């Protein structure tokens, strides 16, 4: 029954990688809390780098600076 | 003043259907809690089936299997 | 499979009212989009009036002013 | 370490405006709570006007009516 | 830089279990997407069983029925 | 009409500080995007330090180590 929301920047994650995140997050809830995987929901949000900020600047700006 | 976030897979919901979700969710808050509809916000997020998981697998994979 | 998050101020909603929100939101997704109710998740968040703002002020301040 | 999520309708915010939101929200947390800006995350979500409702109707419908 | 939000019912998860969720979710992002763990944020929300619904009823009601 | 969610650790923010966050975030949306403050909603979530992780560990653990 848990709900997991994973938010990452949109920088080319493949369908396989997103499936691995979903599989891994579901298994984590099984392992740690014995949650039922059948009703565990995982949603991956991919956010444009212009829309994600850390340290007060966008990821777009950071990538340009090489961080 | 309530805020309602409805997250569904992106599988062809029409503008009319999304308007019906917004109307219905707003009315629900009026009916149950007498909330003011004028400041009730409803946001519908449509999520790619590759990015939505249940039971540890993506909805894309489930649809392929016929579930 | 939808996920619905209803956020309201914590101002005395009863368990029965919260159950009505859950029932109503689930039914809304069935009616509008034929979603499977068995995997539809609804989470109600109740937020202190000091922590909820509209119009640039807290609900606590608005309630004191009689709005 | 704070996480700020700003949700707006997708109506032409520029990259510069989104950078200003990120800068401003990060600074707000520094000013009010002395939070460390280096680990403050700000995510801007832009939502289609068909998917955003207020007063029980979509922003698309409101814009057509001139509100 | 990812942000992960894990929402579970409040049913006695210990501090150790929550630490394990945080550690595991952070590691998952490292393993699958090589994300920097130092800026990965994980937030666990524990929600009262009266406030969590699935299948149109609250978890409180389900627990009473023995599900 | 924007919705802003500010999530911080629960470490003693006062009602005045939370009101300042609400006022400041609302003004930011006015200044940058000319949004209507009357329908701008800001919600502050305070999260226990056991439930907030960064760098793979809880804030509780970090505070004990003096970070």
Image (cartoon, coloured by chain):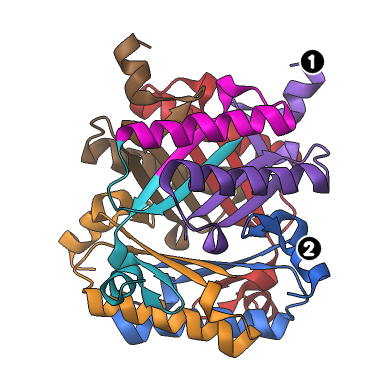
Chain colours: A brown, B orange, C blue, D cyan, E red, F purple
Q: Is residue E15 left or right of residue D58?
A: right
Q: For the residue carrying disc 1, how many other residues have a C-alpha within 10 Å: few (<14), some (14-19), or many (20+)?
A: few
Q: Is residue D18 left or right of residue B37?
A: left
Residue at 56% over, 55% down: A35
- Quarter of the rendering occupied by the N terminus of chain C: bottom left
Residue at 26% over, 33% down: A13
Image x and y of residue B60, in percent: 21, 56
Image x and y of residue B47, in percent: 30, 56
Is residue D58 in the magenta section?
no
Instruction: Please say whether residue C21 is visible from this viewpoint.
Output: yes
Image x and y of residue A10, in percent: 29, 35
Is residue D33 in the magenta section?
yes
Can you tell which quarter of the image residue E14 is in?
A: top right
- Relative depth, front residue between A62 and E41: A62
Q: Marks 1 and 2: same chain?
A: no
Closer to us: mark 1 or mark 2? 2
Q: For the residue carrying disc 2, how many other residues have a C-alpha within 10 Å: few (<14), some (14-19), or many (20+)?
A: some
Q: Chain of mark 2?
A: C
Residue occupied by mark 2: C60
What residue occupies the far bottom of the structure in this picture?
A: B31
What residue occupies the far left of the structure in this picture?
A: B64
Span highlighted in magenta in the image: D15-44
Q: Chain of mark 1?
A: F
- Relative depth, front residue between A48 and F33: F33
- Mark seen at residue F66: 1
- Callout 1: helix, strand or loop? loop
Instruction: Please say whether residue C1 is visible from this viewpoint.
Output: no
Image x and y of residue F9, in percent: 71, 38
- Mark seen at residue E54: none
Residue at 40% over, 70% down: D53
Q: How many marks?
A: 2
- Quarter of the rendering occupied by the C terminus of chain C: bottom right
């Amino acid at each position: 029954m848990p709900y997991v929301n994973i938010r990452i920047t949109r920088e080319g994650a493949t369908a396989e990688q997103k499936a691995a995140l979903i599989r891994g997050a579901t298994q984590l809830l099984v392992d740690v809390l014995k949650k039922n995987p059948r009703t565990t929901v995982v949603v991956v949000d991919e956010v444009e780098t212009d829309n994600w900020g850390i340290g007060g600047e966008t990821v777009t700006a950071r990538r340009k600076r090489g961080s």
